[in-house]
Image: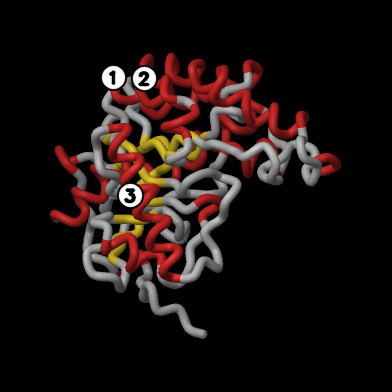
Amino acid sequence: MHNQLFDYSPIVDRAPVRWPDGARLAFYVGLNVEHYEIDRPSTSIFAGTRDLAPDPLNYGWRDYGPRVGIWRLVDIFDRHGIRPSVLLNSDVTEHNPQIIDAGKQRDWAWLAHGKNNSILQADMPVDEERAYLRDVVDTIEAATGTRPRGWMGPGLTETFHTPELLAELGLRYVLDWSNDDQPYRLNVPGLLSVPYQTELNDVTMFVGTGVSGPDFLQAVKDQFDQLYAESADSGRVMSLALHPFVIGQPFRAKYLDQALEYITGHEGVWLTTSDEIAESYARN
């Protein structure tokens, strides 16, 4: 079947995108704050045990994130004035409420990211999905005091009905379609796609391709330099997708610190959230 959610739009044929205060590049951190069920396989560092229940090796690796890694990241974000866009599993509000409290104190942006990262979005019947999405959004709103405006599916998964169901709930944008360096309108009234660059993702890089910390730092710099150069005439978006159990490891965290120091050291960079990017694009 043909894609009906969005139309083809070459970036060279568009009207210029303008960001607030003359900024060239909009930069946000997509911080994945997730919950995993102990008896289901998920993101793993060692495939040999991933189908076991329980799986102490892989579950414990993931559980390092909420217990230790995220608190290391909090210090780094505070040091560089970063308000992350939190891709939040609603189950976190029950199991890790201290993380919610820390984010509320810092005015983090809260996006809906499904119930947990053990349940993927694909293949849900439409009525079941409608109830599921409503529960996720309402749970996050009750815990954070803010109704999510953005969505990213667990594993970036959707059904063909997900965008229209999200619009019914009042959400304004999705991050699932990683195909652009600028926001664009979807063929669902009131709904945008905001860039979320999956190759510059700590799971993709460190777990998927096995890069080192210095390699990660260089890749972030290279991504920034290219987008910054291209943004001279029309604004671009750079996202940095992070998972506390990956980049929050002691031997990697300093490279995130150095990457953010590099980005924040440039003029014309709008340090923002995905919420604010969507709002600015929709308004202008």
Whether residue 269 is visible here, answered yes or no, is no
Viewer-closest of 10 and 81: 81
The residue tagged with tag 1: helix, strand or loop? helix
- The total of numbered circles placed on residues is 3
Q: Which residue is situated farthest in the bottom direction here?
A: 1
Q: Is there CB contact under 8 Å for labels 2 and 3?
A: no
- Name which residue type carries label 3: Gly
Q: Residue 102 bears which disc, if any?
A: 2
Whether residue 115 is situated above or below residue 214 in the rendered picture = below
Residue under circle 1? 105
Residue under the point 38% across and 46% down:
112
**In the image, residue 216 lies at what x, y percent?**
60, 33
From what the image shows, is residue 191 above or below residue 126? above
In percent of width and height, residue 240 lies at 46, 38
Amino acid type at circle 2 is Ala
Residue 171: image tag? none
Q: Earlier in the sequence, mark 2 or mark 3?
A: 2
**Secondary structure state at the residue bearing disc 2:** helix
Where's residue 236, x and y in %?
33, 49
Q: Is residue 244 left or right of residue 177?
A: right
Residue 163: x and y in percent read: 36, 65
Quickly name the residue at label 3.
150
Is residue 89 visible in this depiction of the protein?
yes
Estimate how packed mark 1 is, as few (under 14), some (14 to 19) or many (20 or more) residues with alpha carbons within 10 Å.
few
Contact, mark 1 vs mark 2 (Cβ under 8 Å): yes
